[in-house]
Image: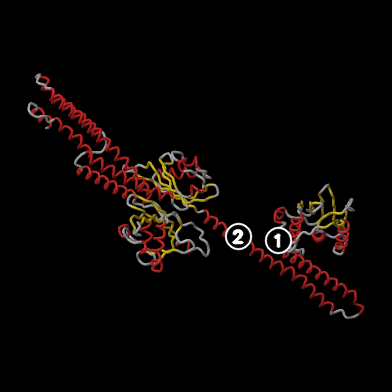
Amino acid sequence: MLLGLDLYFSPLLHFSYLFVAPVLITAWFKGKNSTLLSGYFVTVLCIIGLYPDIKTSQLLIPQLINHLLSIAGIWVAVWFVIRNKFSDRLKFREQEKLDALFENATEGFLITDTKGQVVLSNPSATKQFGFTKEELIGKPVEELMPKRFKSGHSHYRNSYYVNPHSRSMGSGVELFGMRKDGTEFPIEISLSSFITEEGMFVIAFIIDITERKKDEGAIAHHVEEIQNLNAHLEQLVEKRTTELAQAIIKLERTNKNLQENISEKQHAEQALKESQRIYSAIAHNFPNGIIALLDSNLNVIFIDGNELVKLNLNPSELLNRNLTSKIPINNPDFISEKLNRVLDKKQQSFEISIVEESYFVNAVPLIDLYGDVNQLLMVWLNITERKRAEEEIKNALEKEKQLNELKSRFVNMASHEFRTPLSSILSSVTLIEKYPAEAQQEKRLKHVDRIKGAVKNMNEILNDFLSLGKLEEGKIQCKPDWVELNFIIDDVLETMNGMLKQGQRININLPELSENIFTDKNLLRNILVNLLSNAIKYSPEESVIDLKILIIKSEMIIEVTDQGIGIPKEDQVHLFERFFRANNSTNIQGTGLGLNIIKRYLELLGGTITFKSEINKGSSFFIQLPKNQN
């Protein structure tokens, strides 16, 4: 039609400038190809309109100039439409990123003006308070708190506007929010501020700590999962895309000239920058966490949050770098596997460790209009303190379990070990009463010896219990002094002679013991007495017990060897534990404390003990002590 008008009226009027119109109409079509094709097509039509005049030699200079200006106007319009399409697509992508950050944050965000009225909220905040987004907008923040806090809150709010700064709200005070249904719930709030052309605004980061409050008595065993990101993200993105497209169409139709169009678009760009500033402020002040945006190659597009400061990481140095190449994650292969699943449109939640900090990570795919995943959003939350609390509970439960086992073993052992000598004493006293005659003195003495032996055994058991109790209470300390070693040996051997079984003897190998040593004589004496008494107890009659002492430079080495029942190999690893007795010693009286006490004494003296043993061939114990106790 345009060509016909141009051909028909060319002698009088020129309609070639109307060829610009089809190009401008393509501004409502997607892609730049439609605009380019339209430009080529109408250019050809314009040239065809010029052809009849050239053929008839009726071409005038004004006609030629008009056609050339029309062609120039066509390609200026092509350039303008393509440029605006490219600009609109960039703005749409930036808006999409910012919307994803704000809408999918797991913490509640409220933005208020200087009057304390809510101007913007995210889905998490609406869910926390039970209001819809429309109900929250314009609502005073005092209506989101219990009545007992409302009267004084306006004063604190006005004070904050006088000196705005990032801080936690209500330090040392328990804070509560109130839902739409009137129920209260405990919260933590962090405040931050920013200024736009419209004035000052305050961002409130709101965390619902209901579960943490419920579990304060026992410290929860499980970390509260980050709130699931909105399952309808794709629908919301499509809705916002449609709204933005409609707004652009309406703007282009109402613009009367190109200058007004440019002015409106500049205004839109300024609003976009303000929106970016708001989202950047949210991400930068995200408490105890990190917000990151990655591309399909797991390179960082955007990252910010308070935890980056704790990890000594600079956000600018992480941009356009692979996430695992710059952040010291303890298991980079694990997180790469999880993030590749997110690129397959599968949301992932998992825990990772960075240096000594633990984080709970929620990663979701960002799906574009074509159903492709070219980016993914990650929200990190520091759970180090919760993990440490869980570990402390586990350790406490394990210690309590061990203590209960020790108490049980102590009761069983004590009742058994005391019952046997008491029964022996009772039976001997009963039998003594049956021998009143003087001629029966020998029989009476036999039972008196049994009573003495039983009392002696009970005394040894009580000594072991007392020693263990003093050690546990820290009442036994090393008090070194100069002592004569041969004097200690003589004292120990004199004590042991009264404990030897029939035919038993102690073979002594003590070369050059005339020198003095600097140590705690009482602890050393108790160690030797315990070792020799064990050797006597677990060795048969007519056996030999070897005692060797050597002093080599600054060390004293003690060796005690018996020909007793030996220690089973499977029991040797537990030999120095409290109340432990080997399987082959159940018929021999004992508390299972002797070797444990020896080891504790040696720790006080800075010494060590080792052994070797074989069933029915005896045991050898080796002690190394410093000659001069420090």
- Near-viewer residue (249 or 204): 204
Q: Which mark is residue 398?
A: 2
Disc 2 and disc 1 in contact, CB within 8 angstroms? no
List x then y, in percent, for residue 185.
42, 64
- Near-viewer residue (250 or 194): 194
Quarter assignment of residue 259: top left
Question: Which residue type carries mark 2?
Answer: Glu
- Near-viewer residue (66 or 629): 66
Quarter assignment of residue 597: bottom right
Question: Which residue type carries mark 1?
Answer: Arg
| Residue 451 seen anywhere in this rendered image of the structure | yes
* Number of other residues with Cα within 10 Å of mark 2, as a class: few under 14, some 14 to 19, many 20 or more: few
Q: SS of the residue at dot 1?
A: loop
Q: How is the image coloured?
A: secondary structure
Q: Which mark is residue 190?
A: none
Residue at mark 1: 578
Q: Is residue 629 left or right of residue 6?
A: right
| Residue 622 seen anywhere in this rendered image of the structure | no
